[in-house]
Amino acid sequence: MANHDYDLIVVGAGSGGVRAARIASELGARVAICEMDRLGGTCVNVGCVPKKLFVYGSHFAHDLVDARGYGWSGEAAFDWPTLLENKNRVIARLNGIYLELLEHAEVDLFRGRAELLDPHTVRIEGAERTATRILIATGGRPLTPDIPGAELALTSNAVFSLPVLPKRMLVVGAGYVALELSSVFCALGVDVTIVHRGEEILRGFDRDLRCHLHDEIEAKGVRILLDTQVKELRKSGSSIEARLDNGEVLETDFPLFAIGRTPNTDGLGLEALGVELGQRGGIVVDEDYTSRVPSIHAVGDVTDRMQLTPVAIAEGMHFAHRFFGKGDFRIDYLNIPTTVFCQPELATVGLTEEEAWHRCPDVRVYRSVFTPLKLTMSERKERTIIKLVVNAEDDRVVGCHMAGHGAAEIIQGLAVAMKAGATKAVFDATIGIHPTSAEEFVILR
Ligand code: NDP
């Protein structure tokens, strides 16, 4: 151990890498981290944080409509450069906080591209440094399809710094990124069309919620084309033409691919060292985040499992405690709650109704669709859906789903109840907070 420069070198200073580096250092390890871009990774720079700020920004369009029903009047104007500028300020502050966190934890930071030369040596901008263990936490990047003209489209990386708000936007895909950004830009007045290859948006989520969201998002003005693919993009004057496989030609200013993300493993020299990569390029690791090479580990999106920031952070913690502490931090991957910040917001934990029917001998389903009290005085007609899925055999709640205002905040709390093994009887015995949307979860009959 003492022969190496460090006990741990982390490659990638995003959510998972920084957490692992800090915890390992606090546990007494000599740690270095390298990063070729801004600190904080996807989440801070081109993901969760700027996205949520855009979501907040776009929500005012709805709030202003609601306000009229409550007696407020007057014009409000939206200024895109102000949103961008203020968002950039917040991100720069977070980049600084990440730097302070690393400095405070006495982690050495090296700027530049890293390449592994052997199972213990990393070359960063020409300088070689060795470590007992190397943790790859390089995250992922948006995919682009292999179609003619693909280079004319942008991905979520560019959306957060668009100099001008487009008039028309074409979004390919109907998962997290596609729906979140479609909702944001639609609320900001952009004419948005979603082109999706599947038979319904949001594959993998509960069917009732998928259909509910389809209707609500369409009602807000987003055009959704299902069972359709973009075959080609072509420049046409100042616009871009998208040729669809149904024969339609769509003119747009801004085609956006939101068709998933791929792990950042290129150029790291992993395969030459015998690190196994999965079919989609993710590093294959065991339950302790160790690759096929015992000194090389990986956490977060680069392993191509659950691409969620809190999961990457938890994996970083597990890794650090496992190899530099007492190994007393473990992750339970069961019932991880998640949200798509589309409008209305979708949040979910546990099994969909369809999954429950496959896994439980009998299932009870409770569902309510309603107009939240706030909107009864607004011209907006957005409806909320909530749904509980219960294993009829033992009364355990196995799935909680919601699409509506505040869904993420509500489902986070219900995820705790589900972790504690709450039954439907426990939900029934809980007194509601009135009047809220959340109380609907405890009065479902
Ligand atoms: P998703 O996997 O969520 O969605 C990808 C979408 O693109 C699906 O609708 C998929 O269709 C479609 N698609 C995939 N390949 C093609 C193709 N070749 N041609 C046309 N359509 C295609 O990916 P995202 O990029 O939206 O997000 C990546 C991940 O990042 C998410 O899975 C999530 O884990 C994470 N994320 C989390 C967020 C959050 O927590 N709020 C926000 C944003 C991202 P089909 O359904 O048919 O496969």
Image (tube, grey):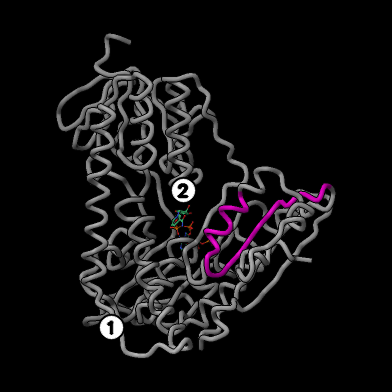
Residue 408 to residue 100: above or below: below
The quarter of the displayed image where residue 2 is located: top left
The answer to if 15 sits in the magenta stretch is no
Seen at 53% across and 24% down, the residue is 328
Badge 1 crowding class, 10 Å Cα cut-off, few under 14, some 14 to 19, many 20 or more, is: few
Instruction: Mark 2 or mark 1: name the one nearer the start of the chain.
Output: 1
| Residue 277 shown left or right of residue 382 in the figure | left
Secondary structure of residue under mark 2 = loop
Seen at 46% across and 83% down, the residue is 66
Three-letter amino acid code at the position of disc 2? Leu
The answer to if 402 sits in the magenta stretch is yes
Residue on which the image places disc 2: 308
Q: Which residues are magenta?
A: 394-415
Q: Position of residue 85 (x, y in %)?
A: 21, 65
Three-letter amino acid code at the position of disc 1? Ala
Seen at 52% across and 83% down, the residue is 219
Q: Position of residue 14 (x, y in %)?
A: 33, 42
Tell which of 256 and 109 is nearer to you. Answer: 109
